[in-house]
Structure formats: C-alpha cells, structure tokens
Amino acid sequence: MKRLILLGSLSLFVMSCNKKTEAPKKETPDVDTLAATEPVVDTLGPKSFCYMGVIGKDTVFVSIDDNLGTISGKMATKNSEKDSNKGDLSGFKSGDTLKLTYEFAAEGKTGNKNDIYFLQTKDGLSEGIGERDQETGTKYANDSKVKYDGGRVLKTADCKVVSKVLK
C-alpha cells in the first residue's frame, strides 16, 4: 500500500511539474544610433554645380550636372564687345578634368560646336587652352598638351543666380 501511495504521489508530482512551454523571447535587434540620426545622402544620383567667372567686362556662367561621370549642363557667355553665346554642354569626367562639347548659338547661327575642357577644383573650374585641330578647328589637336593656366577661371557660384541667366 505504501508503494501505491508513494507511486500515486510521485505521478501527481510529475504531472504537476508538466513542462511548460515558454514563448520564445523576442530578440530586439541592436539599434545603430549613428545610422538612425544621420540623414541619408544619395551618393549615386546626379550632382549639380554652378560656376561664374568675370573677365574684364565679360561674364561666363556654367551649370553642370555630374551623373556618375557623365556630364551635361549649360553655358552662357555675356560679352560686352562682341556677340554673346549660349548653349548646352555634354561630355564626361576623366579624373578631375571635364571633357565637354559645347553646342551653342552665336551671331544668329545655331549648331556651332566646340570642345571645351575644364579642370575641376574645390574652388571652381579652370578652362583648358590648347592647339586646335587644323581640320575641324573645334577639337583639340592633342589632349595631353592642353594647359589649364592662363585660361578663364570660374569660381563656384549660387545656382539660383546662374540658372536665371541660363534660362
């Protein structure tokens, strides 16, 4: 009889100690506080830059969009002594050099094209000067001989001001 009582008590004890299934704890992911507080910056989208240069009584305005090295933009030259010109820039970036084609209208004539190279610095642009191809007169004869001292220097400018002129 003692065995029966002992066995009955033991089975009650075992049944009351039935394994309780615990809900798994939800792990909260570690929060990167640095990432949460810093604004997201689009490094792959186009970047816009605006420049202006005053040479004597003449003024040059340039607006450039850099989309992963493919350059597009606008340029206008307001000349005091001769006809002004305005047009589109297109080309590519090679290192810190912008190798562009300037398609513009001047003296009532549209469709003029000219190669124009700029050295891009943190302060602005320096226009390249070099010998032109005898055949076309619009392209540089030798890219490696283009010099960036002595040409027009354009400084960083407010894009609102530049875009008003380039409209």
Image (tube, grey):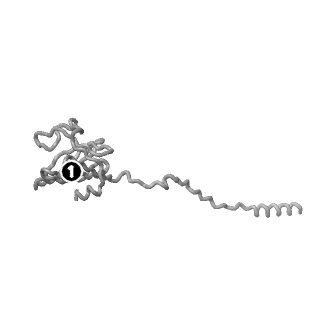
Residue sitting farthest toward the right: 1
What residue is shown at x 83% (from left), y 63% (from top)? Answer: 9
Which residue is disc 1 drawn over?
59
The answer, for residue 117, to whether it is visible in the render is: no
What residue is shown at x 21% (from left), y 50% (from top)? Answer: 59
Image quarter hosting the C terminus:
bottom left
From this view, report whether residue 165 is shown above or below residue 141: below
Name the secondary structure under disc 1. strand
Image quarter hosting the N terminus:
bottom right
Residue sitting farthest toward the top: 145
Nearest the viewer among 120 and 138 is: 120
What residue is shown at x 40% (from left), y 53% (from top)? Answer: 41
Three-letter amino acid code of the residue under disc 1:
Thr
From this view, report whether residue 62 is shown above or below residue 145: below
- Residue 141 coordinates in the image, percent (x, y): 16, 38
Quarter where residue 142 is shown: top left
Would residue 60 be found to the left or right of residue 24 on screen? left
The answer, for residue 134, to whether it is visible in the render is: yes
